[in-house]
Each structure stands twice: as structure tokens, then as C-alpha cells.
């Protein structure tokens, strides 16, 4: 049974193999035919493409040839046109060159003609120069015979005359320039000083050497005097100030030339009166407290002066001395305020002149430093101030300004001159000093009196601190023509009779008025 099965399977396998072989051969033939067909189709397509390519190449070749021929034709035309233009340009250049050559030939001919004319004129000029030289020589000979001078002597005479004339002219010019410079300097100085005065305008208050202490009642006078006068003696001994107790109601007067002591006495007395306990021990205590308070005030006033004037580097002892000036007066003018004003004025004027304003302010502030101790140290306040400045290492410029501010020594620096001017300005302000105020008022009154003495003057007014006087004249007495003469006469009388700084403007006013009333 198994054999039959194996035989059957073997037959099936053999049959399958044979069938597969037959099918494979049939497939190979089919693929061969398909490939041959595809190859033939591709060859035909390739042949077609080749033909089309050849045809396209032929067509492109023809187009390219045509374009090349057109380009060659265009380039030939452009070359011919450019060649033609260049030929034309060459022709124009040749024509222009020919014209220039002709013009140049013409100019050369003219130049040669002018040279000939110039040569001819030169010959004429040479001939004339010879004639002039001969004539000049003859004139010189004639002048020598007439004047009796040789040429050299005549030259020397003329040069000498010219030198003398030039010297005279030079002297006149120098005088003219000097006068002009003086006028300009005076004008600038007046402007500078007036500007400084305007910027440092300050109220002036005259001070005295006495102080009045108010009392609550007249019974307090007896308590201040004390038993057998022991209280008043204690106060005067401790303070060095005289107490004046008179019939003045409810007031006691303190008198003394030392303002610091007088201030200490005033403060101590006011506190004693306020406290009510007045006896020698209490008086001694209050005087000591007042002394410490005044010393503190002196220090603060010195610091304030330095701070307000913008200075720095001051020695502490100088600050104390400056503070003492707060209680010092000169003709009623507070010396510390005066010193600060001089510092401000000096600094402003120095700034306007381009000088270091700090040095000028420092010199102005310290110029009267000697007055702080002049009642304690022998010598003038200038000598004392110089010694103080040297002691505390102030600069030479400041020391010289202190020496020269009253003219004791000649001022050799601009700073010293500025301090001199500022000191005079501060002291000369109306109201600054009692004595100067009186003289100022008298000068204005005298100025008006001089003007009122003339015939035809109705009224006169001194204005601008006496620098101008305005005069009203009677029109029926003084005519317009006479006003000029009258003004000159008044100015001459003022010059002869009055002493005044600067100049005074005499201003005459003549006015006619016609008044009527409509009824």
C-alpha cells in the first residue's frame, strides 16, 4: 500500500517538475518577445528623437547664423558711425587749431608792434630823464648859489626841521592820549565804584558810647545803689563802667569807652533787675555769666562775618578779634559792619578788574582789626593790625593793604588801592558817621547858598548827594542867552569857594508859563 502511495507521490512530483519546466520556458519566450518588442520600440523612438534633434539643430543653426549676421551688420554700422564721428572731430580740432594758430600769429604781430612802440617810448623817456636830471642838477646848483647851502647841508637842515616838527606832534599826541586815557580811567573808575556802591547799599546807624537800661520803677535805683553804695561800687569795679543815676525817670545810663565792658554791664544789670536779688555776691555771679555770654557772642559774630564775606582759613584768634569789633564804634559807625562793607566793596571792584576777589575781601575785612585791641595795646590801630596779621600768618598783600589803607605808607598794589577806596566809600556814606553827616549837610546847604547869591536865581536844589545843583531862574530877569553865562559864573564861584569830591553839574532851568481861565 505504501509503495503505491510512494509511487503515486513520485509520479506527482515528476509531473509537477515537468509542468514547471514547460511553464518556465514558455515564460522565458514570452519575456524575450516582450523585450524584443520594447527594444524595437525604443530604437524607433530613439531614431525619431535623433531626427527631431537634427532638425532642431539645423533650425537653431540657421537662426544663430542669421543673428550673427545681424550682429556683424550692426557692429559694422556702429564702427562706421564712430569712425565718421571721429573723423568729424578730427576735422573740427584741425579747424580750431588752425584758428588758434592764426590768432596766435596775430597776437605775436601785435606784441611785436607793441614792443617796438615801448622801445620807442623808452628811448623818449630816457631822453626826458636825462633832460630832467640836467634840469634838476641845474636847479640844485641854483639853490646852492641862492641859499648858500650844499645838498648835504640842506638835507641836514630839512631833517632837523622835520625831527623838531615830529617831536612837537608826538608830544601833542602823547598829551592827547594821556588826557583820553585819564578820562576813560576816571569814567571807568566812577562806574566801577558806583556799581560797587549800588550792590552793597546798606543802612547806616550811628552808635553812641553810652547805654540806657530801663527800670521798672524809680525804687530800683536805690536797690542798685545799695547800702552805702556798695552795690553800685561792686558793679563799677567788676565791669569797669560808670553808672549814671540821675533824675531820668525809670532809667540808668551806663557810660564807658570800652563797648565790650559796657555790654557786659548792661546784660548783668538787666538780669539783676529782672531777678530782683541785688547784692555783691549775686552781682559778681551775674557779671561772670554776662561776660561768658558776650564772649560767646563775640565768637559767633566773628564766624558770621567770615561766613558772610565768603572767606575761609581764618585763625580762631582772628575770629575773636573780629567779633570784638561788633562792640567797637568809630565816629558812631559800627566797626564790624564797616569792615564787612569794605570787604564786600573791595571784592566787587576786584572782580570787575579781574583780580582775585578773595584776597581783596580778606584785606578789606581785616583792615581795621587793630581797633579790636587798640585800647589795650600801645600804638595806632594800623600798627596793631599789621602785628596781628603777621602773627597769624596773613599774606603780604593783606598786610600791605592794612598798612596803606590810611595812606601812612604808599599803596603799591591794586588790592591796597581798592581797600583805600572801599574804606573811604564806607566812611563817606551819608549817615555812616556823625561828623561826616554834619559836614555833608553843611556842604549841600553851602552849595545852595552860593547859587542863591546870584541875581535872577529864584530857587536852587542840591541833588544826587551834591553832585548836581538844579537852579530855577526868573525868566523876566535871565534870558536864554544869559543862561550860559550865568551857569559858567555859578560853576566858577563853586570852584573857588567850596571843597567837594568829583565834579558838580550846574543845571539851570528857565521856564515861561502863560495861565488863563475860561469863564
Image (cartoon, rainbow, N blue to C red):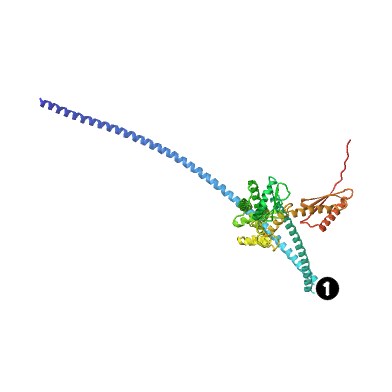
Q: Is residue 67 left or right of residue 9?
A: right
Q: Is residue 265 left or right of residue 50?
A: right
Q: Is residue 41 visible?
A: yes
Q: Position of residue 462 (x, y in %)?
A: 80, 51
Using a 10 Å C-alpha cutoff, classify the residue at mark 1 as few (fewer than 14 neighbours), some (14 to 19) or many (20 or more): few
The furthest residue to the front:
228
* Of 352 and 231, the residue lying toward us: 231
Q: Is residue 2 left or right of residue 160?
A: left
Q: Residue at x 16, y 29 (%)?
A: 13
- Residue marked by disc 1: 147
Q: Position of residue 474 (x, y in %)?
A: 87, 48
Q: In which quadrant will I find the C terminus?
A: top right
Q: In which quadrant will I find the N terminus?
A: top left
- In the figure, 287 relative to 50: above or below? below
Q: What SS does tag 1 mark?
A: helix
Q: Position of residue 5 (x, y in %)?
A: 12, 26
- In the figure, 286 relative to 111: above or below? above
- In the figure, 152 relative to 406: above or below? below
Q: Position of residue 78 (x, y in %)?
A: 55, 46
The image quarter in which residue 111 lies: bottom right
* Of 369 and 68, the residue lying toward us: 369
Q: Is residue 260 visible?
A: no
The image quarter in which residue 233 lies: bottom right
How many numbered callouts?
A: 1
Amino acid at each position: 500500500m505504501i509503495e503505491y502511495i510512494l509511487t503515486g507521490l513520485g509520479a506527482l512530483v515528476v509531473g509537477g517538475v515537468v509542468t514547471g519546466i514547460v511553464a518556465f520556458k514558455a515564460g522565458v519566450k514570452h519575456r524575450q518577445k516582450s523585450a524584443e518588442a520594447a527594444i524595437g520600440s525604443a530604437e524607433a523612438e530613439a531614431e525619431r528623437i535623433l531626427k527631431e534633434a537634427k532638425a532642431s539643430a539645423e533650425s537653431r543653426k540657421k537662426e544663430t547664423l542669421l543673428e550673427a549676421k545681424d550682429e556683424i551688420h550692426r557692429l559694422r554700422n556702429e564702427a562706421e558711425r564712430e569712425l565718421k564721428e571721429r573723423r568729424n572731430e578730427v576735422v573740427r580740432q584741425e579747424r580750431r587749431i588752425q584758428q588758434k594758430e592764426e590768432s596766435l600769429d596775430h597776437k605775436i604781430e601785435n606784441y611785436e608792434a607793441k614792443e617796438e612802440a615801448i622801445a620807442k617810448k623808452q628811448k623818449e623817456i630816457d631822453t626826458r630823464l636825462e633832460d630832467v636830471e640836467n634840469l634838476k642838477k641845474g636847479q640844485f646848483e641854483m639853490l646852492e648859489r641862492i641859499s648858500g647851502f650844499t645838498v648835504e647841508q640842506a638835507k641836514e637842515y630839512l631833517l632837523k626841521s622835520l625831527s623838531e616838527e615830529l617831536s612837537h606832534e608826538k608830544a601833542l599826541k602823547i598829551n592827547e592820549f594821556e588826557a583820553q586815557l585819564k578820562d576813560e580811567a576816571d569814567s571807568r573808575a566812577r562806574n566801577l565804584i558806583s556799581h560797587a556802591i549800588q550792590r552793597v547799599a546798606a543802612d547806616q546807624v550811628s552808635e553812641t558810647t553810652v547805654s540806657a537800661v530801663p527800670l521798672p520803677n524809680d525804687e530800683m535805683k536805690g536797690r542798685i545803689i545799695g547800702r552805702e553804695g556798695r552795690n553800685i561800687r561792686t558793679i563799677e569795679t567788676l565791669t569797669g563802667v560808670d553808672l549814671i543815676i540821675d533824675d531820668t525817670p525809670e532809667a540808668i545810663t551806663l557810660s564807658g569807652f570800652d563797648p565790650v565792658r559796657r555790654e557786659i554791664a548792661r546784660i548783668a544789670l538787666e538780669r539783676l533787675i529782672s531777678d530782683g536779688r541785688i547784692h555783691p555776691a549775686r552781682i559778681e555771679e551775674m557779671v561772670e555769666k554776662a561776660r561768658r555770654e558776650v564772649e560767646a557772642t563775640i565768637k559767633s559774630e566773628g564766624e558770621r562775618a567770615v561766613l558772610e564775606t565768603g572767606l575761609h582759613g581764618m585763625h580762631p584768634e582772628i575770629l575773636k578779634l573780629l567779633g570784638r569789633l561788633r562792640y567797637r564804634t568809630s565816629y558812631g559807625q559800627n566797626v564790624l559792619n564797616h569792615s564787612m562793607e569794605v570787604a564786600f566793596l573791595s571784592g566787587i571792584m576786584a572782580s570787575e578788574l579781574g583780580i582775585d576777589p578773595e584776597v581783596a575781601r580778606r584785606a578789606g575785612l581785616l583792615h581795621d582789626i587793630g581797633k579790636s585791641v587798640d585800647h589795650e595795646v600801645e600804638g595806632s590801630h594800623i600798627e596793631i593790625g599789621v602785628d596781628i596779621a603777621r602773627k597769624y600768618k596773613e599774606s603780604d598783600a593783606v598786610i600791605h593793604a592794612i598798612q596803606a589803607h590810611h595812606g601812612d605808607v604808599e599803596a603799591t598794589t591794586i588790592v591796597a588801592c581798592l581797600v583805600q577806596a572801599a574804606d573811604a566809600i564806607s566812611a563817606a556814606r551819608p549817615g555812616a558817621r556823625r561828623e561826616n553827616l554834619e559836614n555833608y549837610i553843611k556842604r549841600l546847604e553851602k552849595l545852595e547858598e552860593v547859587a542863591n547869591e546870584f541875581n535872577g536865581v529864584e530857587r536852587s536844589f542840591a541833588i544826587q548827594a551834591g553832585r548836581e545843583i538844579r537852579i530855577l531862574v526868573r525868566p523876566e530877569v535871565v534870558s536864554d542867552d544869559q543862561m550860559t553865562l550865568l551857569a559858567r559864573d555859578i560853576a566858577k564861584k563853586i570852584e573857588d569857594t567850596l571843597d567837594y569830591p568829583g565834579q558838580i553839574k550846574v543845571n539851570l532851568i528857565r521856564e515861561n508859563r502863560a495861565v488863563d481861565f475860561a469863564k
